[in-house]
Image (cartoon, helix red, strand yellow):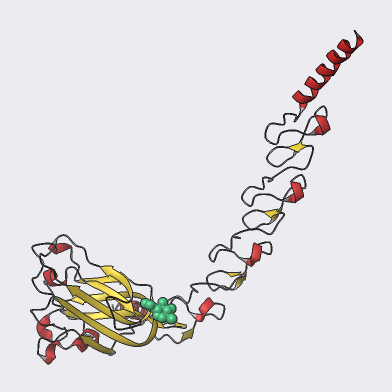
Amino acid sequence: MATRKIIVRRHLILILFYIVTTVRSESNVAVNKTTEQSSDQGNVKYAASHVVDDCLSTDLSNGCCTHTERGHTTAWWRVDLGELMTIIRIKIYYRDNFQHRLAGYQLYVSNTTNTPTDGDLCFVDTSSTKNAVQLVVTHQCPYVGRYVTVYNYRNNPKPYSWYSDWAILELCEVQVFGCPTGRYGDGNCQKLCPVDCYGGNCNSKTGACFYCFAGKFGIYCNSDCPANCKDSLCTKDAGTCLDCVPQTYGVQCEYACSTNCLNSLCEKVNGYCYECIAGQYGFTCDQNCHVNCKDILCERSTGNCIGKQYLSTLIWWSTSGAVILSF
Ligand SMILES: *[C@@H]1O[C@H](CO)[C@@H](O)[C@H](O)[C@H]1NC(C)=O
């Protein structure tokens, strides 16, 4: 009995360890940062800073949420992350049971405090029913920026009768997962993005580059594009050439165009010649024109002689001419 208990406990510890390390693979860069909101309900209990206090309770009475004033047609809350951050996703916790107030909100990432005119819009709530408004929700928000703003407004008439009359925000927590630009990983953003990432920035969780320098590809941009890619350009993920240097074709431009192609030039996708050298026909110009064709020239697609008709007419005319002349 005693050993069984120990084993169970060890498993529990391992599971807990796993959960803790998984959670730590991303950093919430909003905690305790500077916040601002459009108005205060007048109680320090509802101050803007409660949205980044790491308290996830969504019960307003617990003192972990904000509450902007009634009577306004717009309301906003903003956090200044202090420096440029590479953001992955943003998680919002809103006051329990108050969907009618959160409905219609917008989420922005920006470099200035001029939202909503400035910045990248990550999300707009367009829920048509009250129950469709998610109060605890994660939004993918893969942008680089310094400020995160939650914004809401009310127009008259309201889009739905169940909307609140005034724009009011009662955010309980906004978690911004990301890292300062140029860094990533392990819940503390201590790793530097790979040197090969173009612009020096990378995914704040995985360290994958967003873009590579010309000539490179791969998650960390440390593979060389195939040698025959034109201008050394290839796709970031698969290393497929965008275009080939002359006289080559294939996904990686690894094949030589047929020497039966005029100037050995062919299409990248299938190696079909643009034009054939004299005496050849077919897509890859691998067929010989008939020796009876004049100058052994034939049509590219059918192999029909070029000028055969003209030639026989000429012979006929000269023959009859000869007959006439002999009279
Ligand atoms: C903020 O500035 C950085 C660096 O110039 C830029 O990469 C980023 O796209 C900007 N973000 C927004 C939301 O405009």
Q: Give the residue at x 19% y 71%.
A: 135
In the rendered image, is residue 187 in sight?
Answer: no
Q: Is residue 155 left or right of residue 150?
A: left
Nearer to the camera, 24 or 278: 278
Q: Give the residue at x 51% y 81%.
A: 200
Q: Is residue 187 above or below residue 132?
A: below
Q: Is residue 179 left or right of residue 265?
A: left
Quadrant position of residue 142: bottom left
Q: Is residue 136 above or below residue 277?
A: below
**Quadrant containing the N terminus in the rendered view:** bottom left
Residue 149 percent coordinates (x, y): 26, 79
Q: Is residue 306 left or right of residue 221?
A: right
Q: Give the residue at x 10% y 82%.
A: 69
Quadrant position of residue 35: bottom left
**Quadrant containing the C terminus in the rendered view:** top right
Residue 211 percent coordinates (x, y): 51, 72
Residue 51 percent coordinates (x, y): 22, 84
Residue 216 percent coordinates (x, y): 60, 70
Q: Residue furthest bottom?
A: 44
